[in-house]
């Protein structure tokens, strides 16, 4: 029974990976090729190894194309740390980021202009809003804007606007606002101690 459960889990995971791949490729008009088959197989093996060796760590994952090149990345979340992997002959780590705060949310946009992950977190009395994607094969973390929701800077005697922008791109800032207000949270799939939970759907 255990072997049968592992087999069905692997088949189920493969089916979800294929569905996620087909959606991305259909949007871009591409057909599956050898590289696509390789990343599917590699991600399955990689996830099974993580689940086997770190089953008590509470890992979660999602598969999402962060740079719009039709080859999705594997994003693994361990508590508040994100690590991004990519298939390039073998699985390689693109980069990681640890939010290190309990109030953190991650969002996914339906716009092809923003294939990355939008984030929100609270730290130092500020609400921080930003964007994570891949540029020049490296993980890029960009804070877009923040707001002093608590008035802490005024209490400290420092002058600043309630809202401060760090990007001149008003469209991406608006996108981050809309995703937050509309609760467009990115759905991760949880890995339990016994198997990979495939009840949830990979959105991208």
Image (spheres, grey):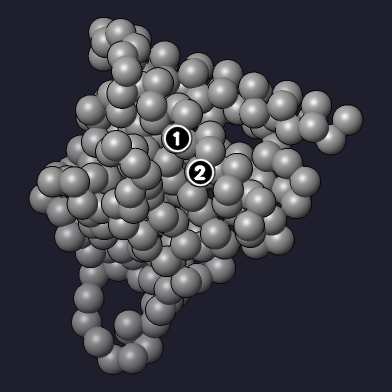
Q: Residues within 10 Å of mark 1 (few under 14, many from 20)?
A: some
Q: Is residue 35 above or below residue 48?
A: above
Q: Nearer the viewer, residue 163 or 192?
A: 192
Q: Is residue 174 above or below residue 77?
A: above
Task: Please report the residue visible at 70 percent of the width from the left and 37 percent of the height from the top.
Answer: 197
- Name the residue carrying label 2: 46
Where, by quadrant of the figure, is residue 140 drawn? bottom left
Question: Could you tell me how many numbered marks the image carries?
Answer: 2
- The quadrant the N terminus occupies is top right
Q: Nearer the viewer, residue 4 or 126?
A: 4
Task: Please report the residue visible at 27 percent of the width from the left and 10 percent of the height from the top.
Answer: 30
Q: Residue 131: where, in percent of width, then height?
A: 29, 50
Q: Is residue 80 above or below residue 190?
A: below
Q: Residue 37: where, in percent of width, then height?
A: 40, 21
Element under disc 2: helix
Mark 2 in CB contact with mark 1 (< 8 angstroms): yes
Q: Residues within 10 Å of mark 2 (few under 14, many from 20)?
A: some
Q: Nearer the viewer, residue 89 or 178?
A: 89
Is residue 7 shown left or right of residue 151? right
């Amino acid at each position: 029974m255990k072997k049968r459960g592992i087999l069905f889990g692997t088949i189920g995971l493969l089916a979800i990976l294929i569905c996620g791949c087909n959606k991305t490729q259909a949007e871009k008009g591409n057909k599956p090729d050898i590289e696509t088959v390789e990343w599917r197989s590699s991600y399955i093996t990689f996830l099974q190894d993580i689940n086997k060796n770190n089953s008590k760590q509470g890992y979660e994952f999602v598969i999402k194309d962060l740079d719009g090149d039709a080859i999705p990345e594997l994003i693994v979340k361990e508590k508040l740390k994100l690590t991004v992997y990519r298939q390039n002959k073998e699985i390689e780590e693109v980069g990681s980021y640890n939010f290190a705060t309990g109030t953190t949310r991650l969002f996914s946009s339906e716009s092809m202009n923003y294939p990355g992950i939008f984030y929100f977190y609270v730290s130092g009395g500020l609400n921080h809003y930003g964007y994570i994607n891949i540029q020049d094969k490296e993980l890029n973390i960009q804070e877009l804007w923040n707001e002093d929701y608590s008035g802490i800077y005024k209490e400290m005697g420092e002058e600043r606007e309630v809202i401060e922008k760090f990007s001149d791109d008003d469209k991406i800032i608006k996108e981050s606002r809309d995703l937050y207000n509309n609760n467009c949270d990115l759905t991760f799939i949880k890995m339990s101690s016994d198997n990979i939970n495939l009840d949830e759907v990979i959105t991208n």
